[in-house]
Structure formats: C-alpha cells, structure tokens
C-alpha cells in the first residue's frame, strides 16, 4: 500500500495542487483546511507525512506542528511546512515547534515529490 500524506491548507487551490502532485506519484492524500480540521482528520488514521501551511484560520500551522508533536502517534511523523513565508524568524519558529522541513510557495511538483520521498522513504 502507498504512503499516506495529510495536506493542510486553507486554500482549496493549493490543497488541490499538492494532492494532484502526490496522487500522481502514488501517494494517498487526506486533506484539511486548517489545523483544527487536520487534528480531526488524522484521528485514528496513520499518516506517513504531514504538509501544512502556516497562515490559516482557527489554528495556524506552527500551532498544529506543536500539537502534533505532543501526540504519541505523531511525535515522529515528518512534518513539512509549505508556505509563502520565508523569513528566518518564521522558519526558526517552525523548527522549534518540531517541523521537519520548510518549502516556500510557489513550489515545483518535482521538488515537492523529491522532499516528500526524502523524509518518507
């Protein structure tokens, strides 16, 4: 069975782009529009990688990373932040929350697949 990825972004267009890219490479993709929905979506689900935006309503991506790292089932799950934010302070906040990596939008499908494959062999 293929690897499962959770894509979290408040932009449906961005979720669609990430999902299309990953599904085309054989991944199963779950989607959520913010951190609160993401936590609901993964309850009882095994996910191999989580890709999240930073700026979202209800619960932002960095808060989501912190909450996921507090859950035993996801303490070691690779979490990639995919965002337009590129300031070092934001990257440092993501890293200290427990993010595995940082990808700046717009992304190339090839680069996304390469990074996902690297963190989730």
Image: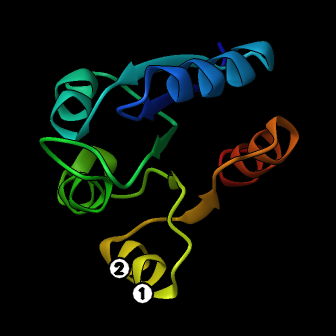
Tags 1 and 2 touching, CB below 8 Å:
yes
Q: Is residue 48 left or right of residue 54?
A: right
Q: Residue furthest right?
A: 110
Instruction: State the residue position of label 2.
Output: 93
Q: Residue at x 55, y 29 (%)?
A: 14
Q: Nearer the viewer, residue 47 or 86?
A: 86
Relative to residue 20, is residue 100 depicted above or below? below
Mark 2 lies on a secondary structure that is helix
Tell me the distance, in whole angstroms, between the alpha carbons under discs 1 and 2.
Answer: 6 Å
* Quadrant showing the N terminus: top right
- Element class at badge 1: helix
Please report the residue visible at 28 percent of the width from the left and 44 percent of the height from the top: 56
Against 32, residue 59 (above or below) is below
User: Percent x, y for residue 27?
Assistant: 67, 20
Q: Residues within 10 Å of mark 1 (few under 14, many from 20)?
A: few
Which residue sits at x=51%, y=80%?
87
Q: Position of residue 30 (x, y in %)?
A: 44, 18
Q: Split into 4 quadrants, where in the image is the C terminus?
A: top right
Would you call the spot at circle 2 few (<14 residues within 10 Å), some (14-19), or many (20 or more)? few
According to the image, label 1 marks what residue? 89
Looking at the picture, how far across and down is residue 50, in whole percent? Answer: 46, 41
Where is residue 95 drawn, in percent x and y?
A: 43, 77
Q: Is residue 86 left or right of residue 11?
A: right
């Amino acid at each position: 069975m293929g690897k499962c990825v959770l894509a979290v972004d408040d932009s449906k267009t961005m979720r669609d782009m990430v999902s299309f890219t990953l599904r085309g490479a054989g991944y199963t993709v779950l989607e959520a529009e913010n951190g609160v929905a993401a936590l609901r979506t993964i309850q009882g689900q095994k996910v191999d990688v989580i890709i999240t935006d930073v700026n979202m309503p209800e619960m932002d991506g960095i808060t989501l990373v912190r909450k996921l790292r507090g859950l035993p089932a996801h303490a070691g799950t690779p979490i990639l932040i995919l965002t337009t934010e590129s300031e070092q302070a934001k990257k440092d906040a993501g890293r200290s929350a427990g993010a595995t990596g940082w990808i700046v939008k717009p992304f190339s499908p090839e680069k996304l697949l390469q990074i996902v494959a690297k963190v989730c062999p």
